[in-house]
């Protein structure tokens, strides 16, 4: 019997989280959405998710801030985080993030839904 994967989506853009949530539900995933990065950080600390989709560029607290906090608290390695962003990050910045245990992959906005599925299920 297959268990349903639980995905946390953290992005300040409600249009994006709404689209991703609808798509993932249609594909049979359970998902939780937050548009507040601080809430996203607390949810990651308090609950286990099969995958966390994390926007890097958010106001007030960035996805990088969340990753650094999880790393400081020694819980990053226990996560499966797929980062994404519309902003241009250098290849070396992305590679530095991908070297961290717990960071599964990186997607560029606009997110290609087939790439998203691959990142979540791999």
Image (spheres, grey):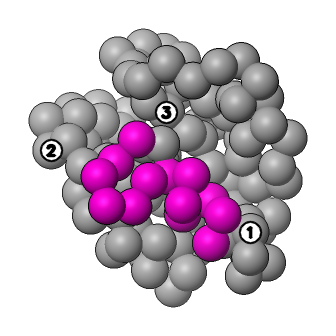
Q: CA distance from mark 1 to mark 3?
A: 18 Å
Residue at horizontal 72%, vertical 46%?
A: 103
Residue contact between numbered discs 2 and 1, judged by CB atoms under 8 Å: no
Disc with the residue nearer the chain's start (2 vs 1): 2
Relative to 74, residue 3 above or below: above
Residue 80 covered by magenta stretch: no
Secondary structure under tag 1 reads helix
Residue identified by numbered label 2: 14
Label 3: few (<14), some (14–19) or many (≥20) C-alpha neighbours in 10 Å: many
User: In the rendered structure, which segment of residues is drawn in magenta?
Assistant: 57-69
Disc with the residue nearer the chain's start (1 vs 3): 1
Residue 70 visible (yes or no): yes
Residue contact between numbered discs 2 and 3, judged by CB atoms under 8 Å: no
Secondary structure under tag 3 reads strand
Secondary structure under tag 2 reads helix
Q: Quadrant of the C terminus?
A: top right
Q: CA distance from mark 2 to mark 1?
A: 27 Å
Residue at horizontal 57%, vertical 24%?
A: 89
């Amino acid at each position: 019997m297959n268990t349903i994967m639980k995905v946390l989506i953290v992005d300040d853009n409600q249009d994006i989280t709404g689209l991703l949530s609808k798509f993932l539900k249609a594909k049979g995933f359970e998902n939780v959405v937050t548009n507040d990065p601080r809430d996203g950080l607390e949810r990651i600390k308090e609950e286990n998710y099969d995958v966390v989709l994390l926007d890097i560029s958010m106001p007030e607290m960035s996805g990088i801030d969340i990753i650094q906090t999880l790393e400081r608290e020694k819980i990053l390695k226990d996560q499966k985080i797929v980062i994404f962003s519309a902003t241009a990050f250098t290849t070396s910045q992305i590679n530095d993030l991908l070297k961290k245990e717990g960071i599964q992959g990186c997607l560029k906005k606009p997110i290609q839904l087939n790439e998203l599925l691959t990142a979540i299920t791999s």
